[in-house]
């Protein structure tokens, strides 16, 4: 054992990119104060090393240059005012079952500093900056010989530490193998060194634990310029996990920038449950397989069962993203969002989605314990492309589904704007559930869905601007619908609907086929106040079909509309309704006289297609709405 102040200078190797010696100074100083050097003996150096750190350099503080193999055989703490500078070739060996806690700065290059092969622990106190290469057991971390044994650097550290991962995937010098889940503390920063997937280092989970990295129960962390992965053979349940501990308080406030999540997981690549105030900037997320069917799953409840606590709060923003799902499964979803009963604010904006099968986005109103989706949930400026060709592409762009057994479920404040998806022939850009458990859209805004059809069930006070066919299978109230009439596009109301306004977004004077059924095939009666208001198209042609009842209270324009009239075929009356200026008559066709046969309002007309002098045209002159009063002309 010796304590010396000399300045040896071993020859640095090519891999020693962080050599700290200069021509005039031994090792970079971290703290002003007493300077000393220590050379390890290879046997237990604890007593001498501890005395130098905690007696000689203390209480003034200072720096200690370390050389040789230092064995620490007992627990030891380095105070915050003592900086350690570890030379290339030196090693701090922590004995099994012992802990070295470093509360001051450590200065070293990108080479191994600690030996904690078995149960020894070298950990840092709050606020320290740590190079992961200080912990690794292999020389260069090539793809076939990844860095190992470093997980304790993160899992044992105190709060607010910054961990630097060097190397890159492309050069095979930045592949870090983890055999346990990484569990950073509050305020932890994980920093890579690249700006793209191939330039960044990669952490590969090679275990079957809960996650490659788990932010469960922690707050205000950051991750930048790094890739999180799961091994193709042995992989965790999820890639990145965010949410509360079971029974724990709120967790979130994270910032994720240029983070890749690419690999194999048994449940999802990203699993974010009740994570509050978390922002993702330019993530690259790709689920390649492993049994999971979701690239990104966010909810207010632990639907996939990984051991987090649900909450009524969930606030997430994702921008400039690439998210893809390469799983060949009809139930797969690239992005899955599940709602809740209180505060939810989720936004995906400006990015690309890839899907091999299933759907690009699924929005579910509620899970096992959480109720209706109240929003706002927004998807904007998104392009979706299939990885499987158009013939077998996903059939659905965005699917809106109700939780099992929930019946009629409100989905409020859903915002969809400027999105386009590659779906197979006959598919839908937006498809809402029907049947026993169905979605009722409330105060939603679906804007500029390009190309394919929209098939919704019920809607109330919504704004829908479409670029393709639109069908409402259920009742629609107080909504505003805009769609193009060109290319044979149609707008269809199947059930009784009140107070809706329909706009044509193409130039005026074109034919716009709008099919509207007030009532249903099962015999339901239309509401007397049912109305369809067509605005902003002078010469629209509107086809109104009614299967069970006469049209009642049908408006043909208002003070703001230049619409001159309405021509409609009423199935129940088997005649054409002509409305203008607030008045309406019927035009009938018959093979005989209508007198005593056809009931109509005064002023209606009937053409007898059987012909004959003075018996072709009949006018209803009297008799109210009965079959009397028809006069041949």
Image (tube, rainbow, N blue to C red):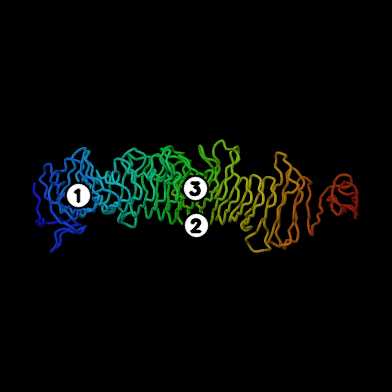
- Distance from the alpha carbon under mark 2 to that under mark 3: 14 Å
Task: Give left or right: position of 580 versus 170.
Answer: right
At mark 1, the secondary structure is loop
| Nearer to us in this view, 244 or 211 | 244
- Distance from the alpha carbon under mark 1 to that under mark 3: 45 Å
> Horizontal and vertical percent for residue 152?
27, 43
Whichever of labels 2 and 3 marks the residue nearer the N terminus, that label is 3
Which residue appears farthest toward the top when viewing the image?
Answer: 405
- Do labels 1 and 3 touch, CB within 8 Å? no
Which residue appears farthest toward the front when viewing the image?
Answer: 59
Q: Which residue matches tag 3? A: 361
Crowd rating for badge 3 (residues with CA inside 10 Å; few <14, some 14–19, many 20+): many
Q: Which residue matches tag 1? A: 112
The C terminus appears in which quarter of the rendering? bottom right
Determine the residue positioned at 64% across, 57% down.
485
Residue 371: quadrant of the picture: top right
Tell me the tag on residue 381.
Answer: 2
- Distance from the alpha carbon under mark 1 to that under mark 2: 46 Å
Determine the residue positioned at 30% across, 47% down.
158
Residue 107: quadrant of the picture: bottom left
Determine the residue positioned at 23% across, 50% down.
79
Task: Give the mark toward the camera: 1 or 3.
Answer: 1
| Nearer to us in this view, 520 or 543 | 520
| Nearer to us in this view, 534 or 305 | 305
Crowd rating for badge 2 (residues with CA inside 10 Å; few <14, some 14–19, many 20+): some
């Amino acid at each position: 054992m010796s304590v010396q102040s000399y300045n040896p200078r071993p020859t640095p190797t090519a891999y020693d990119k962080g050599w700290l010696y200069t021509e005039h100074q031994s090792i970079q100083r971290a703290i002003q104060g007493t300077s000393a050097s220590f050379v390890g003996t290879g046997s237990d150096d604890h007593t001498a090393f501890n005395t130098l750190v905690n007696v000689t350099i203390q209480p003034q503080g200072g720096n200690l240059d370390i050389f040789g193999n230092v064995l620490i055989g007992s627990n030891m703490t380095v105070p915050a005012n003592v900086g350690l500078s570890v030379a290339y070739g030196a090693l701090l060996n922590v004995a099994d079952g012992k802990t070295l806690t470093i509360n001051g700065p450590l200065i070293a290059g990108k080479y191994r500093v600690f030996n904690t092969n078995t149960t020894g622990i070298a950990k840092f106190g709050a606020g320290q900056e740590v190079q992961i290469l200080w912990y690794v057991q292999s020389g260069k971390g090539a793809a076939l010989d990844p860095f190992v044994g470093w997980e304790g650097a993160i899992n044992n550290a105190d709060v607010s530490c910054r961990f630097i991962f060097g190397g890159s995937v492309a050069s095979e010098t930045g592949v870090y193998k983890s055999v346990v889940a990484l569990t950073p503390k509050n305020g932890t920063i994980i920093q890579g060194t690249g700006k793209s997937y191939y330039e960044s280092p990669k952490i590969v989970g090679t275990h079957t634990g809960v996650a490659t990295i788990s932010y469960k129960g922690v707050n205000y962390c950051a991750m930048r310029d790094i890739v999180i992965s799961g091994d193709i053979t042995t992989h965790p349940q999820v890639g990145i996990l965010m949410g509360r501990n079971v029974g724990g308080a709120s967790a979130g406030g994270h910032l994720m920038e240029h983070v890749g999540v690419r690999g194999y997981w048994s449940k999802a690549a990203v699993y974010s449950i009740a994570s509050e105030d978390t922002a993702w900037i330019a993530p690259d997320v790709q689920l390649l397989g492993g049994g999971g069917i979701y690239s990104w799953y966010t909810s207010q409840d632990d639907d996939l069962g990984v051991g987090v606590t649900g909450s009524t709060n969930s606030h997430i923003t994702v921008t400039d993203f690439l998210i893809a799902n390469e799983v060949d499964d009809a139930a797969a979803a690239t992005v899955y969002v599940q709602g809740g009963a209180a505060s939810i604010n989720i936004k995906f904006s400006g990015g690309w989605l890839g899907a091999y099968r299933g759907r690009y986005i699924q929005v579910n109103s509620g899970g096992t314990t959480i109720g209706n989706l109240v929003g706002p949930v927004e998807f904007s400026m998104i392009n979706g492309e299939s990885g499987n060709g158009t013939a077998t592409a996903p059939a659905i762009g965005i699917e809106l589904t109700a939780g099992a057994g929930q019946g009629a479920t409100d989905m409020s404040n859903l915002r969809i704007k400027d999105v386009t998806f590659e779906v197979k022939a006959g598919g839908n850009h937006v498809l809402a559930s029907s049947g026993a458990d169905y979605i009722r859209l409330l105060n939603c805004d679906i804007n500029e869905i390009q190309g394919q059809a929209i098939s919704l069930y019920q809607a109330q006070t919504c704004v829908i601007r479409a670029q393709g066919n639109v069908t409402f299978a259920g009742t629609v109230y107080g909504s505003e619908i805009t769609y193009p009439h060109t290319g044979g596009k149609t707008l269809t109301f199947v059930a009784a609907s009140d107070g809706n306004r329909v706009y044509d977004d193409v130039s005026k004077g074109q034919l716009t086929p709008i099919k509207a059924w007030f009532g249903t095939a099962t015999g339901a009666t239309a509401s007397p106040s049912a109305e369809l208001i067509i605005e902003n198209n002078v010469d629209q042609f509107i086809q109104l079909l009614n299967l069970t009842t006469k049209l009642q209270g049908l408006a043909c324009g208002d003070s703001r509309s230049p619409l001159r009239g309405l021509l409609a075929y009423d199935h129940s009356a088997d005649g054409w309704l002509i409305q203008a200026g607030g008045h309406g008559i019927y035009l009938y066709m018959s093979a005989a006289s209508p007198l005593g046969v056809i009931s109509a309002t005064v002023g209606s007309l009937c053409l007898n297609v059987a012909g004959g002098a003075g018996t072709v045209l009949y006018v209803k002159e009297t008799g109210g709405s009965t079959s009397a009063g028809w006069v041949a002309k």
